[in-house]
Amino acid sequence: MYKTGDKILYPMHGAGVIKKIDKREILGEVKDYYLLNVPCGDMEVMIPVDNCDDIGVRPIVSSSELEKAIAVLSLESSEMTGNWNKRYRDNMEKIKSGEIIAVAEIVRNLTRINRENRLSAGEKKMLSNARKILQSEVMLVLDIGEEEADEMIDSAI
């Protein structure tokens, strides 16, 4: 179990700091919830403590793991299918995994495709979401602001 002040990643939403642990009654059941403050967009998310393992909540990465993810941004794009629907499903599974390297690959690949104006509306939204997830973890690991994290990602790509 995590505690107040811990920095964790919630796949699909990003990294944040546990503001408090609260008991809430939802659908007649009382459960403990983490109230996570995600710095990108100043968003707050409630996460059921019991479901953390199932949904892939994890501590944020170390600075050396972050360096590896940033290095991935400058590598050649991965081979991806030309079928945007299959590519979307594959990328969604990577985001759900919560693995920072996989999210960095998505950000790199989709950013490059977007530069050529070849992304579907769904993939543009996915790129935005993946970028916020990566950006939030960069911000918390390096203790920097949103703009700095954004610039770091852009310059690496």
Image (spheres, grey):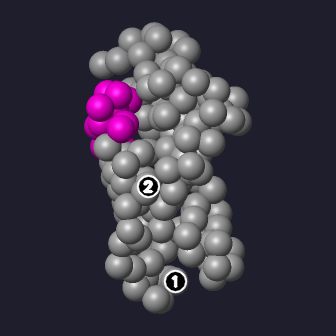
User: Camera-side residue: 131 or 122?
Assistant: 131
Task: Name which residue type carries label 1.
Answer: Trp
Question: Where residue 46 appears, x then y in whole percent?
Answer: 55, 30
Residue placed at 59% from the left, 30% from the top?
A: 38
Work out which quarter of the rendered image holds the N terminus and state it: top left
Q: Amino acid at mark 2?
A: Leu
Q: Secondary structure at mark 1?
A: helix
Identity of the residue drawn at 35% across and 79% down: 79
Measuring 47% from the left and 11% from the top, which residue is drawn there?
5
Above/below status of 40 relative to 131: above
Residue at image mark 1: 84
Q: Main secondary structure of the magenta part?
A: helix
CA–CA distance in space, label 2 to label 1? 21 Å
Residue, x 44% and y 26% (percent of image)? Answer: 141
Q: Which residue is mark 2?
A: 73
Q: Are marks 2 and 1 in contact (CB under 8 Å)?
A: no
Name the spot of residue 102 as percent of width and height, x first. 36, 56
The magenta region covers: 50-67
Vertical placement of residue 89 versus 22, above or below: below
Q: Is residue 124 visible?
A: yes
What is the secondary structure assignment of the residue under circle 2?
Answer: helix
